[in-house]
Amino acid sequence: MKKILIYNSGGGLGDSIQIIPLILSLKNHFRKSKIFYLGAHPNHFKGKLKEYNINVETLELNLKYFGFRWWHLLFVKRNFNTKNNSKFDLIIDLQSKFRNSIILKIIPHIHFYSTTFKNFFSTKKMKYDSKNHIENLSIFLEDKIKTIYFNYNKLPKKLLDEAKKLLPKSNYIGFSLTQGNKYRKKSWSIYKFISLANKTLIKNKIPVFFIEKNQEQLIEKIKNQVPGALFPETQSELSCPALVTALSSRLDQAVSIDNGVMHMMALANIPMIVLFGPTNSKKFAPNNNHTKIIDSKKIHGTNDIESISVDEIYNLI
C-alpha cells in the first residue's frame, strides 16, 4: 500500500488521541505507505498535539466540517479525478454517519473500510465481533496488524524533565473533573471530587488536580478544601496536552470523567478509574487493561453521573 487515508469526524482532542494506536499500528505495518488524515475539524496532530510527534499528513481540502454538508459531495466529484494519482489504496472511515460515508466514498480508492450502516459501504462486507478498528482491519485486509501503543518515554525530554520537577515524589493520585464540551452533563460534582481527594489523604496519597490555569475560582475552591493538593499545570510555562501525559506518568493512579484529559492520562498507561454518565463507555473509554470503568447506566440504570457515590470510587483506590 502506498497511500492510506484516515477520516475522523470528531473535533475534540480526545477524538484524535483515541486514534493514535491506529496510526502507529498502520505506520508500523505499512512502513512504505504515506498516511493522510482528513477530519471534519483541523488536524490536531499538527497543532495542539504536535508534541506527541504523530507524523501524519493532512489531506488539505480547505473545507470546514468535511462530510457534514451535502454539497461536499459535488466538491469531491469536481476535485478528485479517478484517472490521476489521487487514488488511495485504503480509506478508513472512523465515523458512523450515513451522509459522511457517502461523501467520503466518492474519493477514489481501492479498498474502503467503514462500519457505517452495518458495513454497508465497505468494499468487503465482513462481520466483526469487535469495535476495535485495528482488529477489524486485520480481518478486512486478511493481514494481521500488530497493535502499537504510544510510548510516553518518547515524549520530548524537556516535558519529561518538567514532569519530574513538578512531581518529584511518589504516591500521587490524579484527578480530572472538568469537561470541555458542555452539550451533555458528563461532570461529577466538584464536592464529590473534594470529598474523594480528602479520603485519599488517609491512604497517604497526594492529590494532583489537572485543571487549566484560567480556572482560577475552581482551583482556589479546591485549594481551600483539600490540604496539600497540587496543581502542576499552573506552575509550568510548558503547559500542553503532552505535558499532561508526562505528568500522568508520575502518578500511581488517576480518577477522571469522560473528557480529553482522560485520554491524555491514558497514554501514560497508568491505572485509571473513569466515570461515565450519558456518554458511551464502550466507545470512549481508554483501550487498555489498566482502566476501571464506572458507568452509571450499567450500575444504577441512569444517565445521571451523580448517581455514582464517593465510596464506590474510594473502594477501588
Image: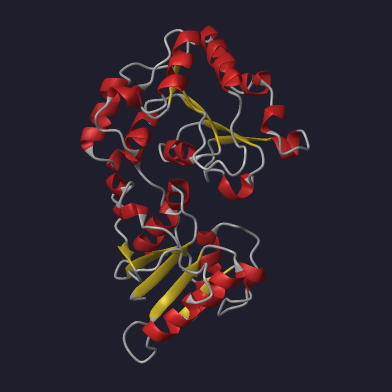
Q: Which of 308 and 202 is in front in this view?
A: 308
User: Can you name the residue that lies furthest to the left here?
Assistant: 158
Residue drawn at 40 percent across, 85 percent down: 78
Tell me if I can see residue 223 in this picture.
Answer: yes
User: Can you name the residue that lies furthest to the bottom here?
Assistant: 83
222 left or right, relative to 131: left
Residue drawn at 44 percent across, 75 percent down: 90
Q: Is residue 29 above or below residue 53?
A: below
Residue drawn at 66 percent across, 38 percent down: 277
Q: What percent of the width, then of the height, locates residue 137?
A: 51, 67
Q: What percent of the width, then of the height, locates residue 127?
A: 66, 69
Q: What percent of the width, then of the height, locates residue 97?
A: 59, 66
Tell me if I can see residue 109 in this picture.
Answer: no
- On-image quarter of the C terminus: top right
- On-image quarter of the N terminus: bottom left
Q: Nearer the viewer, residue 38 or 133?
A: 38
- Residue 295, located in which quarter of the rendered image? top right
**How many tags in the picture?**
0
Q: Is residue 68 above or below residue 77?
A: above
Q: Is residue 39 above or below residue 21?
A: below
Residue drawn at 33 percent across, 24 percent down: 234
Q: What percent of the width, then of the height, locates residue 59?
A: 34, 69
163 left or right, relative to 104: left
